[in-house]
Amino acid sequence: MPESRNSRLTRPETLTAVGIIVVAAGFLVPTYDLRAISALLPAAMLIGLIVLSVFLLLADQRKASAGEDAAPMTKAPKRVIGAFLMIVSYALACDFVGFYISTAVTIPLVAWTFGYRSPVGLLIATVIVVGTIWAIFDFGMSQDFPAGRLWGR
Amino acid sequence: MYSDLLHALPDVFAWTNFAAVVIGVIAGIVVGAMPGLSATMAISVLVPFTFGLEPLVALGLMAGIYNGAMYGGAIPAVLLRIPGTPAAVATTFDGYPMAQKGEGGFALQVAVVSSSIGGIASAFALMLLAPPLSKVTLLFGPSEVFWVAVFGLASIIFLLGGNPVKGLISACFGVFVSVIGSDPIYGNDRFTFGQLEMLDGINIVILLVGLYALPPVIDLLETPLKTDGVNSSKLGTEPIWKALPRMKSFWKTWLRGSFLGIWIGILPGAGGSMAAFMSYNEARRTSKHPETWGEGEPEGVAAAEVANNADTASALIPALTLGIPGTAVAAVMLGGLLVHGLQPGPMLFRDNPDIVFGFMWQFLFGAILLVLLGGSLATNSFARLLNLPRPLLGSVIIVLMLIGVYSIHGRMFDVYLMLGFGAIGWVMDRLKFPLPPVVLGLILGGFAEENLRLALRIGRGDPMVLFQNWTSLILVALTVAVVVGPTLKKRFIDSRKKA
């Protein structure tokens, strides 16, 4: 039985193709302000992206018409979204709270959340990783890590 | 030019450069042994940390990792039937049955010796073939260089297999990313949206880490692999010198696999997996007892492993001479060369002979060290790494990614940019968009644009300047062949099937 109209439009490849078309069209606008020779390659690539995405869209919709199910992007969407959010949160925390505090919290938090539940193992791993980073990068190479915008530095 | 090769040798023995190869091989085996991590990912994570290092130290690490990971992939392939790297799939066919029969230790000995032989052959091919090829490319002017870039992109898109539309989308995306920043000739800002951080363009390392390191981390966290370390604790490997006499009869397989691996490595778009499969099939076809293959035939492990390592250095022949990487790892290594100011192509051999030839020696030593570092005791230890908890590994890689990207310019903007590329990379990976064309697009895009504009200036705006000599025309013909070839081949096969 063919999929419903709604699900046909939410197929991952269809959504990706539409996304590329919209973003590429958006990027195409600033090329009008450029010199022709400067705009040549970027405009060609953006138009190429739009045309190719239309092909991708049509091919995917043709598959949908033939009743072919789209493979899901992930079997564990919650875990994937969780992982992405944790990585983004870690970056934001480094930026605003500071590198060492964020790292000391993130390593055990991520590992615990995704299935490693040994408190001793987590403690040892966190101490080793944070200590090694400090010894090599901070102490050995004088590398400055984000100190945290919230502390006004 | 071969005299430069010898002149570069003493530099390689500087203790820092040699230590880099040793550390690289060990790290590569560790990475390869862990399913979900690959040489491509390891080198992507490593590249930003090498900024402050001497080029030969950085390149030694990369060469070591590449060699080590290609063998390391055999460890879980033999013990768990999970290939540590895609190139180790064919190793599972006979490696795992050997482990089930209690011969896992010997299977890994065969793998390490074969990997080393393949790596040595590949390094020699790189040393012998790259210098003369680089001389040919010295004759290239702007229009020829432009066509080389187009040919490189076309090869990666169309020979990589899969869906050409997706390959083209990846390449267009890569080329588009290459034009972000100041116009190299007029200085106009292109797509910087007022961000000063974007004026210099997108640093290739940010793209590499985002595309190649973030998706595997998400994979690690998405499905924490339940590994069975039982086989790893009772390997009982004997010393290499005791195991070697049992491998005497494999010499033909090693020879054939080395040639196949080198040849496939040179071809843009093909890779270690294809080399391993072809070598395995050929060895099985010519075997006197093909019925035992798939049930624990050590020669099967030898065939797969010699070929997937023979593909390593040879994939760098087109990368170093023309700037066209043969594989994804070669594309990432090309990025590694670029961050050290080493522009692949003919000038590389003229301007930096010590570094480029030193790099070749490092490949050779990396392959030799594989036997010593991946031998009996080490293999036992590396096999135990399979028991490491995946979520912990994932969290540590996240931290390393952030440190690496932040260290490039000391700003969080790059980290956010990397996360953006990572999200794009994950979607591309899941929808089976090939990633190498993106990297190649970024590397060759600016290069192609600059040479196209230069050629047009020379020709006073006449596009026919791009077709005015035989070299250009040959490159155009090769590009057309690469684009049309697979379709014609498919039609030919289909028509023969119908007949």
Image: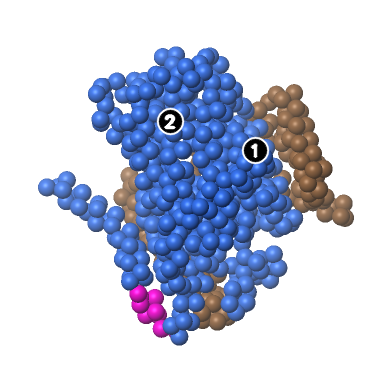
Chain colours: A brown, B blue
Instruction: Please tell me whether residue B466 belongs to the stretch shown in magenta.
Output: yes
Residue at x 42% of width, y 51% of height: B129
- At label 1, counting other C-alpha atoms closer than 10 Å, the crowd grade (few under 14, some 14-19, many 20 or more) is some
- At label 2, counting other C-alpha atoms closer than 10 Å, the crowd grade (few under 14, some 14-19, many 20 or more) is many
Residue at x 25% of width, y 31% of height: B285
Residue at x 52% of width, y 72% of height: B450
Horizontal side of A22 relative to B159 (left or right) equals right
Horizontal side of B306 relative to B372 (left or right) equals left
Q: Nearer the viewer, residue B410 or A96?
A: B410
Horizontal side of A4 relative to B440 (left or right) equals left
Gap between marks 1 and 2 measured at Cα: 23 Å
Q: Amino acid at mark 1?
A: Ala
Q: Which residues are magenta?
A: B461-469
Q: Amino acid at mark 2?
A: Ser
* CB under 8 Å between discs 1 and 2: no
Which residue lies most toward the left here? B499
Residue pointed to by mark 1: B19
Is B171 rendered above or below residue B103?
A: below
Residue at x 25% of width, y 22% of height: B289
Residue pointed to by mark 2: B114
